[in-house]
């Protein structure tokens, strides 16, 4: 059973989802505003937060930013906003998944279980070491030659996913699906931009790569420079 905090201002949706998720075995706490949601997230320490973006006091993106400053609790954004740029921005801000209304309680339940499985796997995993690069999924920390590397949530997810496939070429479509949770193409530039930022923080460039190597027309791979 998961302890789920539902932050949703629509009373009908909030009531329906609370009842349906309870029937599926979850313990539900709910809030209708961002500030109430933040208070409950800090005090109650839920296993997962389901967050609407259209809240009466603060935009959900601002609540997500504030939430990420105080806790690493998994967040599924569930909203009517369906523009690709909005979805990418919210995922880059630290959301773990994005669900567009209308959706069924069964679909939300499946997303909750999938996100919690990923989190539990990450927490159980030993740090990954590739050359002088060390990636600790449990602490969400990266060091290079013993020095900390400050990454955004999405940059960390991208690096960690590539680290799990060390030496293999991973396509941009796969990265969009597995890292950004976008099951469609058309946003390759999003991957390119994040790879560029990641390279800069690892002290390399696309022209002079060390860890991140682009295979033109195919994708990218993470390798040990000494390998």
Image (cartoon, helix red, strand yellow):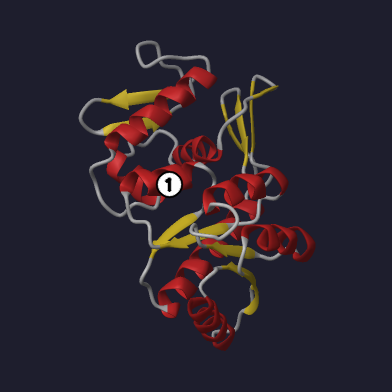
Nearer to me, 215 or 43: 43
Q: Is residue 84 left or right of residue 95?
A: left
Residue 23 position (above or below residue 58): below
Residue 188 position (above or below residue 121): above
Q: Which residue appears at 56% of the width and 60% of the height?
A: 56
Nearer to me, 96 or 5: 5
Q: Is residue 24 left or right of residue 31?
A: left
Instruction: Identify the secondary structure beneath mark 1.
Output: loop
Image quadrant for the N terminus? bottom right
Residue 18 position (above or below residue 188): below
Nearer to me, 176 or 105: 105
Give the residue at mark 1.
Answer: 179
Nearer to me, 140 or 100: 100
Q: Work out which residue is located at the far front of the displayed protein and give it.
A: 56
Q: Work out which residue is located at the far bottom of the displayed protein and give it.
A: 23
Q: Which residue appears at 35% of the width and 11% of the height?
A: 207
| Residue 173 placement: quadrant | top left
Neighbor class of circle 1 (other Cα within 10 Å; few <14, some 14-19, many 20+) is many
């Amino acid at each position: 059973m998961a302890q789920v905090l539902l932050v949703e201002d629509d009373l009908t949706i909030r009531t329906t989802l609370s009842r349906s998720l309870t029937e599926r075995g979850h313990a539900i706490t709910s809030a209708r505003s961002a500030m109430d949601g933040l208070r409950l997230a800090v005090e109650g320490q839920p296993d997962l937060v389901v967050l609407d973006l259209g809240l009466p006091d603060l935009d959900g993106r601002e609540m997500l930013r504030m939430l990420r400053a105080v806790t690493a609790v998994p967040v599924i954004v569930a909203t009517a906003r369906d523009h690709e740029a909005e979805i990418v921005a919210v995922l880059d801000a630290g959301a773990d998944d994005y669900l567009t209304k209308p959706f069924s309680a069964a679909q939300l339940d499946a997303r909750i279980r999938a996100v919690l499985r990923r989190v539990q796997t990450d927490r159980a995993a030993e740090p990954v070491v590739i050359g002088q690069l060390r990636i600790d999924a449990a602490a969400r920390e990266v060091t290079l030659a013993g020095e900390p590397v400050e990454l955004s949530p999405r940059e960390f997810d991208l690096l960690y996913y590539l680290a799990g496939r060390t030496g293999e070429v991973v396509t941009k479509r796969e990265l969009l699906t597995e890292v950004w949770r976008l099951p469609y193409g058309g946003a390759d530039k999003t991957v390119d931009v994040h790879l560029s930022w990641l390279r800069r923080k690892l002290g390399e460039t696309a022209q002079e790569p060390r860890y991140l190597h682009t295979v033109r027309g195919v994708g990218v791979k993470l390798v040990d420079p000494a390998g």
